[in-house]
Amino acid sequence: MSSQGLLRLCTRFYLLAFFAYLFMPLAVMGTAAFNASRFPTITPWQGFTLNWFAALYQDGQMWQALWTAIAVGLGVVALSVPIGIAAAFLIMELRSRARTLVYGVMVSPLLTPGVIIGISTLIFWRPYGVTGGVLLMILAQSSFIAAYVMLLVMARMQRFDRTLEEAALDLGASHLQVFRRITLPYLMPAVLAAAVLAFLQSFENYNTTVFVRGFDTTLTVYIASKVRTGVSPAINALGIILIAVTVLAAGLYELRRRAEARRAARQAPAAEAGPALAQPAV
Amino acid sequence: MTSIARRYGVGLTGAILALSAFWVVVMVVAPQLLMIDYSFRPNLPLPQRGGPEDSYTLANYLTLAGNKIHLKIFFKTIWASALVTLLTLAVCYPIAFYLAQVVAKQRAALLVLLLVIPFWINEIMRTFAWWIILAYNGPLNKILLGLGLIEEPVRYLSGNAGVIIGMVYAYILFMVFPLYNAIESLDRHQLEAARDLGAGWPRIHWRVVVPHAKPGIATGCIMTFMLAAGSYAVPALLGSPGSRWFTEIIYNWFFEGGNWNQGAAYALILLLLCLGFIIAMMKLFRVGLEDISR
């Protein structure tokens, strides 16, 4: 065999092994949800059952944790999205030194371990009588999730044609009108993506949440506590449902994104044919 | 500052500044500063706080130096996180190179989607999946026994092995994407030129691809190390009381020891460790902050 052929064979094998490694855990976890064994495992196989889904449905604590997680997630979206947009606007206006400094502080939560964000938030709010719970979870999670929102909004803003704003102002629109009718609609795809990302980040967060949760339990915290204290395959059933929901959501998102990309590709040649407007340096 | 008011008007500018200030000051900087302040104060009952005994001290930091068990766990956390980082780099480099340089663009997009799907799923769920696989009577032991590779089942979950395996899996994406972005910008002609000049594959990677991908390697390593050293979820699920992680000690100071000041000092030590690693990598690979947070 030629060395080229050998290389190709090795590559094939590596790819297969890599993607097996990636998906095997999910397959094992999903399969265990249908095993009649009292314990989540696939070895030994004790017969097919759907009982664990019924057990999950009747788990009151699970439902409670799910509602808490959704409430926290929505709270994080409501807080971090406006903050992220505002911060992106501010950064775009700053120059040189100030920009570097403020930008550095704003992205620093992304480079800070989650437990530390949780701890500092917990300590900060104690003197004001705010103890662990839904509110503190929202504050702590938003402090780093807002940075993701800011980065997403900034990426889209860099391609924004500012002359549109100026034209609207010259034609007599108020600043608020310009923001609502021109800037915000342009940013909308990034804002929506950021909102979805913020919710998902909040929903799955554990490291930060565990320090600021007080006596409230989110779904992620609930799953972790189950694994530590005695787990039943009902958790696997929950895993399958979460996988199904996320894959479905990801699929829809991807389809929408592609449709949008196609539309943009169709519009782009027309836009380029128009008069070239000088972009302000950012 | 006047330009922003001219662009957005006074009302909107006020909202922009207020929201940004609330985030930076109240949610990020002040809590961190207060945590530092906490870490230098003794843990006193409420009435004595602010009294004569409430003065700055290094006692909370010296606790770590004097506690052999905690010190051991601290150093274990460092080397294990470094090992996780290295293993993740080794697992991810080939796939990143393949996606960025070998395969056609459209196929690469499909593979990237495949790569991302497992990471849409809750980290706790993915870690739980490894808990099932690595269990004493679990499938991995069954397979290895069946193949005759081991004679007795291995207890992965009572040592550090389970934690390290789980972490490598959990952080793949944070390593693949920086690597992929960096390698993708390499001109394919450079690879061909190197090959035409007689370089073998190992040499091409070492002398052409790796130097070009430096910023990506640095970013991936920083993210992975930070996530590993700061993880509470993976060691809590896949570790045991005998293989505790430094974050678990911090957690215990807060919620079992009830000594927040001591916990804050330990948390700050963890933060300094991560900061030290970030600075070392940035110096070593000569990359800036803007490269990392992209």
Image (cartoon, rainbow, N blue to C red):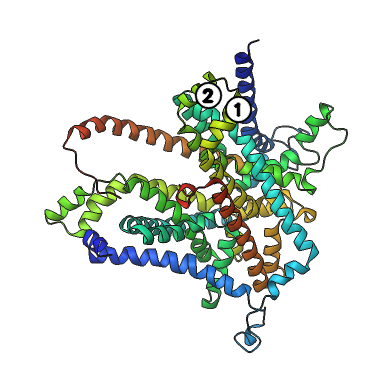
In this view of the protein, which residue sits in the foreground, B7 or A1?
A: A1
Q: Determine the residue located farthest toward the front in the rendered image.
A: B197
Q: Which corner quadrant holds the N terminus of chain A? A: top right
Determine which quarter of the picture holds residue B21.
bottom left
Per the image, the residue denoted by label 2 is B194
**Residue B219 position in % (x across, y down):** 54, 46
Nearest to the observer: residue B24 or residue B288: B288
Q: CA distance from mark 2 to mark 1?
A: 9 Å
Question: Do the residues marked 2 and 1 share a common chain?
Answer: yes
Q: Secondary structure at mark 2?
A: helix
Up the image or down, A82 lies above or below B150; here it is below
Nearest to the observer: residue B103 or residue B255: B103
- Picture quadrant where residue A122 is located: bottom right
Q: Is residue A236 visible?
A: no
Q: Residue reaching furthest bottom?
A: B52
Residue, far right: B151
Mark 2 and 1 residues: CB-CB less than 8 Å, in contact?
Answer: yes
Farthest residue to the top: give it. A1
Q: Chain of mark 2?
A: B
Q: Which residue is mark 1?
A: B203
Mark 1 residue element: helix
> On the rendered structure, is B57 left or right of A108?
right
Q: Residue at x 62, y 30 (%)?
A: A18
Identified by mark 2, the residue type is Ala
What amino acid is at disc 1? Arg
Relative image position of residue A239 (x, y in whole percent): 61, 42
The image shows residue A274, relative to residue A179, as above or below, that is: above
